[in-house]
Amino acid sequence: MQKTILITGCSSGIGLAAAKDLHSHGYHVIAACRQPADVAQMNSLGLTGLQLDLDDAASVDRAADEVLALTQHRLDALFNNAGFAIYGPLHTLTRQQLEQQFSTNLFAVHQLTLRLLPALKASGDGRIINTSSVLGLISMPGRGAYAASKFALEAWSDALRMELHTQGIRVSLIEPGPISSRFTENVRQGDSANPVLNPASADRFTLPPEAILPKLHHALESKNPRLRYAVTLVAQIMTVLKRLLPGWILDRILRGRA
């Protein structure tokens, strides 16, 4: 029986790579994008395009209703991939900017997932996969708002995984380091006159979005999916350093990379 997955943030990067790959492997892919032109592009690729603006609660509800109708209330997997970043020293950011950061990266994920939980339960082996970040493991100067939203997503995912333990739904996190995509060019700067830029050394460790695909397939198809999947050398190293190093030493390392 063909499996159905909803993927958010499919206009580019990880979401687009995942949508194309899973479609080629026989999945029915519902590919959600914010812009109508991108939705049309998804349909032209043979996917089922869906318009979804995570900043708009009404749009999230409309998209959930459409997914439930398309799937007859039976969904095999949800890949919460969409997100964005606001960069800038915390003293340059307003409460409104912080709320917007959390609205997309956490609150909308919560709303969409809860709406689709009954359909995921109906599949008998539902999978929820959330795109976090290496900045869900460590924070850095100038990236505190984005890191805070991803730290929160990690905690939310852990709690959800434990709460759904007996209900046939597995929850996993994918934690990418630097990935080549439009993510960086779409970063919103708290202080546009003094933008926070990634260090030049990051280019040496950047991988294409397809690097996440083996981890995504394992999370979707393994009988024992992992709780977390680090992607790129940077994410793997930071996972180890976070566990082994005293906080003050890690601070010194991260201050030097900011």
Image: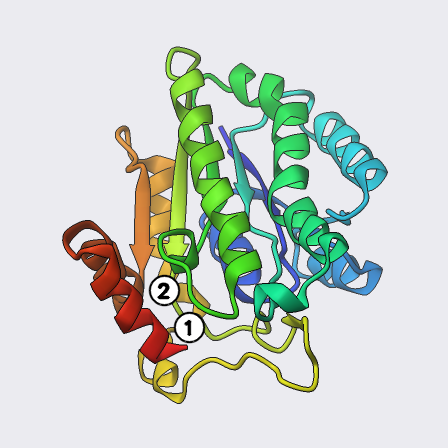
Whether residue 164 can be seen here: no
Judge the density around disc 2: few (<14), some (14-19), many (≥20) Cα neighbours within 10 Å. some
Q: Residue at x 68, y 71 (%)?
A: 190
Do tag 2 and tag 1 residues touch (Cβ < 8 Å)? yes
The single residue placed furthest to the left in the displayed view is: 244
Which circle marks residue 211 in the picture? 2
- Position above or below: 159 against 176: above
Q: Position of residue 255 (x, y in %)?
A: 35, 74
Kind of element beneath mark 1: loop
Which circle marks residue 208 in the picture? 1
Q: Amino acid at mark 1?
A: Pro
Q: Is residue 230 left or right of residue 163?
A: left
Q: Is residue 201 left or right of residue 148?
A: left
Whether residue 238 can be seen here: yes
The quadrant the C terminus occupies is bottom left
- Position above or below: 80 against 136: above
Kind of element beneath mark 2: helix
Which circle marks residue 21 in the picture? none
